[in-house]
Amino acid sequence: MQPSDFTPHKLPMFLGLALLFMLAVCPYAAQAQTPQQIVQVDTAVVSLDISSAVEALEDPTGRLTLAEVRAPEHAGQFAPRFPSGNRAVPVYWARVVLQSNDPASRSFWLDTGTQTPRQIDFYAPDAQGLYRQQSASSALPFSARPLPIKNFVFPVELQPDQPTTVYMRVQGNARLSVIRPEVWKPEALLAKVQADRIEWFFYLGVAAAIILYNLLLFFSLRDFNYFAYVLASLGIVWAVSSGIGGFGFAFETFWPDSPKFEFASWGISLAVSHLLTTYLFSRLLEVRQRMPGLHKWLVRSWTLFGLTAGSMLLILAFGTLSSVWRWLLLLGVVFGAWVGLIVLNALVRAARARNRTVGFIAAAWLPLFVVTIPYSPALVTGSPIDGRYLMWASAFQMLMMSLLLADRFNQEKREKVQAQATLVEGLLNSERELEGKVALRTQELKDEQARTKDLLHNILPVDVADELASTGTARPARHESVSILFTDFSGFTNAVSTMPADRMVAELNEVFAAFDDITDACGVEKIKTIGDAYMAASGLPKPCTDHAQRCVRAALLMLAYLERRNQDAAFKWQLRVGVHSGPVVAGVVGKRKYAFDIWGDTVNVAARMESSGEVGRVNVSAYTYDLIRAEFDCEYRGRVDAKGKGQIDMYFVKEARPDDEVRQV
């Protein structure tokens, strides 16, 4: 442009271009000229958050050295912001300038606020101004850290009245690792770490108590819901203890020498926790029974999520990070979210059906959902995570789910009680109707008291009946020496299958009536009949010294009676008889229809004597044999296996001894 070309009307255009140029250049000039912020570290302050003063420089190649980032061409490129972290292996440099107001040099600890980066190289100058390198890595054992603390922490020495610029080279794992540095007094940070560790152990104790309680309930009640709860709770505790992002207190405490396992552990724990928790919900909501179509989709989604998470974790633990891993991560998130939506659908359906389980689940998961909201972007961006709120929200969730199981148990118990009450009411109504019929048929009896007494004499021993009639109760009593007689027909089941019902009842009535006569004649008390079994006892309610002899004598008479009867009867009954002696407890049970019964191991052994015997023989135990051997000739059988009792010495009674032999014995 020649001077002659310049005219006054072109002056505004030139001024505008100059203004635009200044506006475009000024920000860069201001950025280049802005002095670096110096953080004043007051020695009276316990901790100081310096994250706002951190400046960052992206390192796309990951090859920059400390000398290069301190050189002018890179030093001016530091900016007060963190990089975007879109690279496969994000690397960036961070720097901050610290200055102590103490006249003497002071040692501080710089807490990076994170424990997940692949590696952090920390550079700080010494008293001579030479930079010394310290390193921490999530790929190394816990003992390799500069300081034994969960986060990456580095000691730094601040010189008096002299700004100290520290540098950090941060290399992330699968995502950008954002630091939130703080300067601490060493003793204060140690106290905080110890308090956090105690809080975590207390959380473990609370969780362990809840889990152990429900595990004991599972073994006691045999309800698989309790076991599913235990598995889901273990998954939650594992996820929380892994720091919801890796390298939490679990790494420090349980497997400090296995960083590779810990790096895979946090992902495994999240997947396992999600699967087991949704499985527990599906069981509690009874999705399989009430929503079969939805349950099929849920099973398919579980399978896809499990396969995707397993493949992703295998690559993460044993391979290298690649685009395949990121696609699997995306699929895992999609499938996990799909599982959550299916369970949410089940919750909505259950809520419409007024299922009280939904209220417990909502109350249990609302705090956990609220405190989880900030963690999702933190996991993606690599920001530090404070798991304290999540830890106690998960403890509250476990407690509420345990209360849900207790409420379900109480509901089932109430339903059973109601069903039992209905059944009992029906039985009582039937009993009342039956009593009315009996009352109508017994109106001819004028003396009700005499009728009751006579009836009691028919079903109870005389002494017990008199006590019951006079006092209204019969006290149970222990009898130290009695003999129990058991009989049972061999082949009764087969006979019944071919015998008319009325004929079978008539046969049993005839035989048992004869047995009643025999026991009365021998001084033996009939206890009861159970199907084709007949039970009697001697030595109660009045004690006697010859109770064993009475039972054996009655047993021989019963066999003799059947032998005579079988000669002419159409049905040939074959009888086994067993006798055992020992202590029992006797008493009356029932409120309206009284029954005299006996209990004790002696009764069980007597039953084994009968079942271990032979047809047409009286089988007695060694104890009974000692009581009767003076009056009865017996044959020793040896030690015979008895179900539930092991081997017992048994004898067959052959016959009664003549009187002269009895006197000799």
Image (cartoon, rainbow, N blue to C red):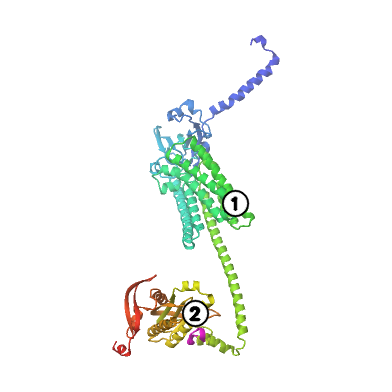
**Residue 418 visible to an observer of this rendering:** yes
Residue 615 magenta:
no
| In the foreground, 383 or 564 | 564
Residue 553's x, y, as percent?
Answer: 39, 85
In what element is the residue under mark 2?
Answer: helix
Q: Which residue does the image show at 52% across and 30% down from the upper left?
A: 35
- The main secondary structure of the magenta stretch is helix
Residue 309's x, y, as percent?
Answer: 49, 43
Identify whether 44 is placed above or below 515.
above
Q: Which residue does the image show at 50% across and 81% down from the upper left?
A: 509
Residue 422's x, y, as percent?
Answer: 60, 70
Q: Which residue is mark 1?
A: 346
Q: Residue furthest right?
A: 9
| In the foreground, 492 or 662 | 492
> In which quarter of the view is residue 586 placed?
bottom left
Counting residues from the start of the chain, the first of labels 1 and 2 encountered is 1
Q: Which mark is residue 507?
A: 2
Q: Residues within 10 Å of mark 2 (few under 14, many from 20)?
A: some
Residue 307's x, y, as percent?
Answer: 49, 44
- Is the N terminus in the top left, top right, bottom left or bottom right quadrant? top right
- Is the C terminus in the top left, top right, bottom left or bottom right quadrant? bottom left
Identify whether 450 is placed above or below 617.
below
Q: Type of residue at label 1?
A: Ala
Q: Type of residue at label 2?
A: Glu
Gap between marks 1 and 2, in whole Å?
62 Å
**Which residues fall within the magenta stretch?**
457-464
Q: Are marks 1 and 2 in contact (CB under 8 Å)?
A: no
